[in-house]
Amino acid sequence: MADSKSMLYYDTKLVDTPEGTTGEGDLSFAAFSLSHAACRDDVLEVRIGEHMLLAWCMECAVMEVFAPCED
């Protein structure tokens, strides 16, 4: 059985983004996470490849795939 407490905590560091580069696509994952924060453990996040993330809220039956915006 996995130690879920140690899986919940991980080190993060701020990314220095150049001024004017944060677009709507960059904030879509944050918006999804905040809108489903009350769902707690019913939100599953799965990394797909190196640059994609699938987020699934089982309580709301909503699934989204997030990837970096390409210019």
Image (cartoon, rainbow, N blue to C red):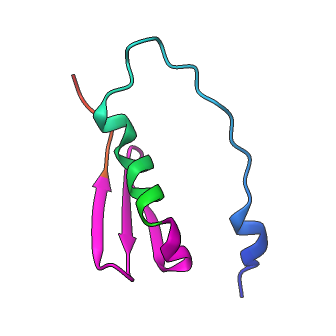
Residue 12 rendering spot, x and y as whole percentages: 69, 42
Side of 62 relative to 46 (left or right) = left
71 magenta-colored: no
The stretch in magenta equals 37-65
Where, by quadrant of the figure, is residue 53 drawn? bottom left
Residue furthest left in the image: 71
Q: Position of residue 16 (x, y in %)?
A: 58, 20
Location of the N terminus (image quadrant) = bottom right
Task: Pick out the residue farthest to the bottom.
Answer: 1
Residue closer to the observer: 7 or 21: 21
Left or right side of 34 for 32: left
Which residue is at a point 32% across and 44% down the rendered structure image?
A: 67
User: Magenta includes 51?
Assistant: yes
Q: Is residue 49 visible?
A: no
Residue 37 in percent (x, y) is at 51, 65
Residue 62 place in picture, x, y as percent: 28, 72
Is the C terminus in the top left, top right, bottom left or bottom right quadrant?
A: top left
Residue farthest toward the top in the current orientation of the protein = 19
Query: Does 17 sit above or below residue 56?
Result: above
Q: Residue at 38% x, 74% y: name it.
A: 57
The one nearer the camera, 66 or 35, is 35
Above or below, 4 against 16 in this view is below
Q: Residue at x 38, y 39 (%)?
A: 27
Is 27 situated above or below 20?
A: below
Task: Tell me, yes or no, if residue 43 can be seen here.
Answer: yes
Viewed as shown, does residue 8 lie left or right of 56? right
| In the displayed structure image, the side of residue 45 where residue 52 appears, left or right | left
